[in-house]
Image (spheres, grey):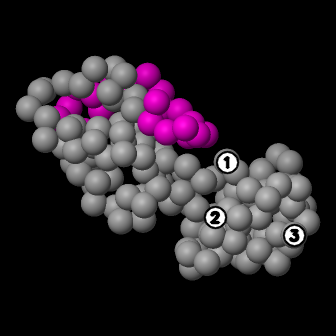
Amino acid sequence: MASAHRSWHIASWIEIDRVRKNPRVFKPLAGHLLADADYASERSEFATEFLESISRSETEELTTRQGEILLELRNEGQRHFGIGDGLSVEILIGKCFLARLDLSSDDDIARIEALKASGRTFVTGKQIGWFKRICRELGEIEAYV
């Protein structure tokens, strides 16, 4: 498993197969994810070691599971500046921060405070699930978003 919290988007088998069979795709992808400073602070030690291994790999093909993990890590590192029909993540972070004491979980309060303190204007694929849940709880987005 790439992380303790699974990514909300799962790659299709067609995409996994396409990536795993092409070293000109999987090696640069692993290298790109390794070089991403924002994602480096969030990924696990396993993920870092896995990406280093894949980026230096001499094989011409990954296993299906390796391809799946690589694409899951890609999804976790993806940046989301908007959600739904153009809702700004930056504005939602500010609104959630102002209303954070209305949250039912101290962990969620800490997450929003840390996100606000980071100065980021986006959330990652790894964060999008809990961020949407918090936004829904505070009434900032509708349930269908």
Q: What's the magenta region?
A: 1-27
Report x, y in % for residue 49. 28, 42
The residue closer to the viewer here, 67 or 115, is 115
Q: Is residue 58 visible?
A: yes
Task: State the residue in front, 50 or 79.
Answer: 50
Work out whether residue 50 or residue 128 is closer to the camera in this orientation and state it.
Answer: 50
Task: In the rendered structure, find residue 82 and report the number of the disc placed on it.
Answer: 2
Residue 13 falls in image quadrant: top left
Residue 45 in the image, given as x and y percentages of width and height: 36, 45
Name the disc covering residue 101, or none. Answer: 3
Q: Within 10 angstroms of label 2, few (less than 14), some, or many (20 or more) residues?
A: some
Q: Is residue 3 magenta?
A: yes
Relative to 4, is 140 on the left or the right? Answer: right
Mark 2: amino acid: Gly
Q: Which residue is mark 1?
A: 129
Q: Earlier in the sequence, mark 2 or mark 1?
A: 2
Of residue 47 and residue 23, the one placed in the foreground of this image is: 47
Does 73 sit above or below residue 67? below
Q: Quadrant of residue 18?
A: top left
N-terminal label among 3 and 2 = 2
Mark 3 → mark 2, Cα distance in angstroms: 24 Å
